[in-house]
Image (cartoon, rainbow, N blue to C red):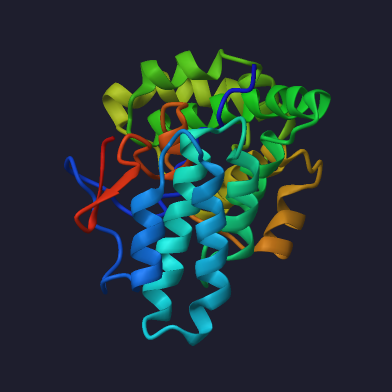
Amino acid sequence: MIRALAISIAVLAQSGDAVRTPVAPPAPWVEARLAALRPERPVAYLELAEDLMDRAGGSTSPEADRALARHLAALAGAIDIRGTGRSAALFLLEHAPLGADQSRLRAIASLLDPSTDRAVEAEERSDAAMALLQAFSHYRRGEGGRAKEWLERAGAAALLDRNPTVLPGGSARFRAECDAMRQSGPPIVAPAQVEALHALVAAAASGEPRSWSEAIVLEGPAPLPELNVSDPGAVFGVDPRASVWRSGAWAAP
């Protein structure tokens, strides 16, 4: 069973029972198709997203249309992560805005590969990296006990020991610093360590066995992503419950 890659990509921020996405009112043809969308047919969300992107160049509000298209694709992925999740991730990767962290989208697309064998392999590779990422999230906040708990899961300690650039001294130093946090507080994590950890997680999740330094050269450094609970809404940064367009807003069916 594929577990969703718990990386928040936050396509659009959401709150409340209804979510307003476009800045300008959609064109009449868009409004009609939005109103016809139903979560029982998530592929229709992707189809509309593709049409919006294709026509955005000639639109009076191209950026709003592109943002709506990304939101639609994210909804398609969150509504049916097994059926349309990978297509949604690939769409978001292709149409990512300038400055977006494309390595995260590649990782999601790889994990949701329809090939069962590859999906299982990607999941196994990513488990240790995800546990290590969670461990470091608690480590950086000074939560030593929780950090050590996560370090013991899914081979995270062994992964840390194999990648000393993330933390010289490996798992032994990690545990020692966690024990010392009550007196000394959270340790300082250098930017290079953050970059190394991010690249390690991205490479493990996407199945690309390259060094962190190669990843940084190819993709550039990025801030440490926050780990979310593993659910489709967190993966795609949307609330799949707000999937029906009603009176100019996204709402529950």
On-image quarter of the C terminus: top left
Q: Could you tell me residue 82's position as x and y percent? A: 61, 30
Residue at point 55%, 33% (across, down): 81
- In the image, residue 228 sits, relative to residue 196, either above or below, namely above
Position of 104 with respect to 110 (left or right) is left
Residue at point 69%, 21% (across, down): 158
Q: Could you tell me residue 169's position as x and y percent? A: 63, 30
On-image quarter of the N terminus: top right
Front residue of 21/247: it is 247
For the question of whether residue 151 can be seen, the reply is yes
Q: Could you tell me residue 152's position as x and y percent? A: 56, 13
Count of residue discs: 0
Q: Could you tell me residue 114's position as x and y percent? A: 75, 33
In the picture, residue 117 is in which quadrant? top right
For the question of whether residue 189 can be seen, the reply is no
Residue at point 64%, 42% (across, down): 86
- In the image, residue 52 sits, relative to residue 209, either above or below, namely below
- In the image, residue 3 sits, relative to residue 69, either above or below, namely above
Position of 34 with respect to 134 (left or right) is left
Position of 52 with respect to 95 (left or right) is left
Front residue of 83/106: it is 83
